[in-house]
């Protein structure tokens, strides 16, 4: 039986529904499912292109999925997991308002939960090089509305907007 999550931009009131890819990424899906719900500041991808994401504290090494079902070219509707330590995100060029907060939180690791909403994405970063992500879900409802809201984030700014992932009601 498939499991689903909702992905919501709180201020914009836009939600899409995604199916977890339990067969392709069982460890990552388990880690995500166990940490839900999560809600934090949303960011728009600067390097990858058509991506929004949030950063949350890593749930602990016992929940680290390692690499599985990875990609460097996510497609529209992909949900991805990335693991970072705080120093990897400490460069001021990333645009985070509180660099030290990310370094401090990152001492235990940070998880980047990302939603890709358009084509032609490439996961390469000037500081890190290639950054493969674990594809753990696919949007099955509401991608067009989410893509429009994401484009508004790109042009209008992300300040104050929250990205929430939660278990979906069946």
Image (spheres, rainbow, N blue to C red):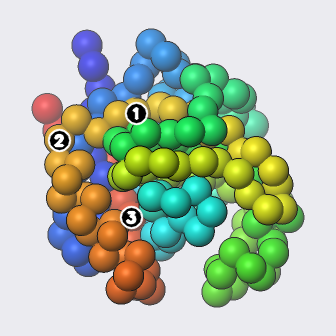
- Name the N-terminal-most of marks 3 and 2: 2
Horizontal side of residue 72 vs 103, given as left or right: left
SS of the residue under disc 1: strand
Viewer-nearest of labels 3 and 2? 2
Q: Is residue 164 visible?
A: yes
Q: Determine which quarter of the picture holds residue 12.
A: bottom left
Q: Determine which quarter of the picture holds residue 98.
A: bottom right
Q: Is residue 10 visible?
A: no
Circle 1 packing at 10 Å, graded few (<14), some (14-19), many (20+), is many
Horizontal side of residue 120 vs 27, given as left or right: left
Q: CA distance from mark 1 to mark 2?
A: 12 Å
SS of the residue under disc 2: strand
Q: Position of residue 79 (x, y in %)?
A: 44, 41
Residue found at the very far front of the displayed protein: 120
Residue found at the very far left of the displayed protein: 170
Q: CA distance from mark 3 to mark 2?
A: 17 Å
Q: Position of residue 147 (x, y in %)?
A: 28, 59
Q: Check whether the beta carbons of the residues at disc 1 and disc 2 lie within 8 A of each other.
A: no
Q: As displayed, is residue 3 above or below residue 156?
A: above
Q: Check whether the beta carbons of the residues at disc 3 and disc 1 lie within 8 A of each other.
A: no
Nearer-the-camera pick, 157 or 18 = 157
Circle 3 packing at 10 Å, graded few (<14), some (14-19), many (20+), is many
Q: As displayed, is residue 117 above or below residue 46?
A: above
Nearer-the-camera pick, 163 or 37 = 163
Q: Looking at the rendered structure, which numbered label has been put on residue 137? A: 1
Q: Looking at the rendered structure, which numbered label has been put on residue 141? A: 2
Horizontal side of residue 64 vs 151, given as left or right: right
Q: Looking at the rendered structure, which numbered label has been put on residue 163? A: 3
Q: Identify the residue at image location x=30%, y=30%.
A: 19
Q: Looking at the rendered structure, which numbered label has been put on residue 123? A: none
Q: Identify the residue at image location x=25%, y=58%.
A: 146
């Amino acid at each position: 039986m498939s499991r689903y999550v909702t992905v919501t931009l709180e201020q914009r009131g836009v939600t899409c529904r995604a199916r977890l890819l339990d067969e392709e990424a069982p460890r990552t899906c388990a880690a995500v499912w166990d940490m839900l719900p999560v809600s934090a500041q949303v960011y728009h991808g600067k390097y990858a292109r058509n991506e929004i994401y949030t950063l949350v504290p890593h749930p602990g090494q016992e929940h680290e999925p390692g690499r599985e079902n990875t990609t460097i070219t996510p497609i529209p509707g992909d949900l991805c997991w990335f693991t970072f330590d705080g120093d990897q995100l400490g460069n001021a060029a990333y645009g985070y308002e509180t660099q030290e907060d990310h370094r401090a939180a990152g001492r235990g690791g940070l998880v980047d939960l990302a939603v890709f909403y358009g084509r032609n994405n490439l996961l390469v970063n000037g500081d890190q090089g290639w950054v493969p992500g674990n594809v753990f879900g696919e949007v099955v409802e509401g991608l067009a509305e989410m893509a429009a809201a994401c484009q508004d984030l790109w042009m209008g700014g992300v300040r104050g907007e929250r990205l929430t992932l939660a278990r979906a009601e069946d």
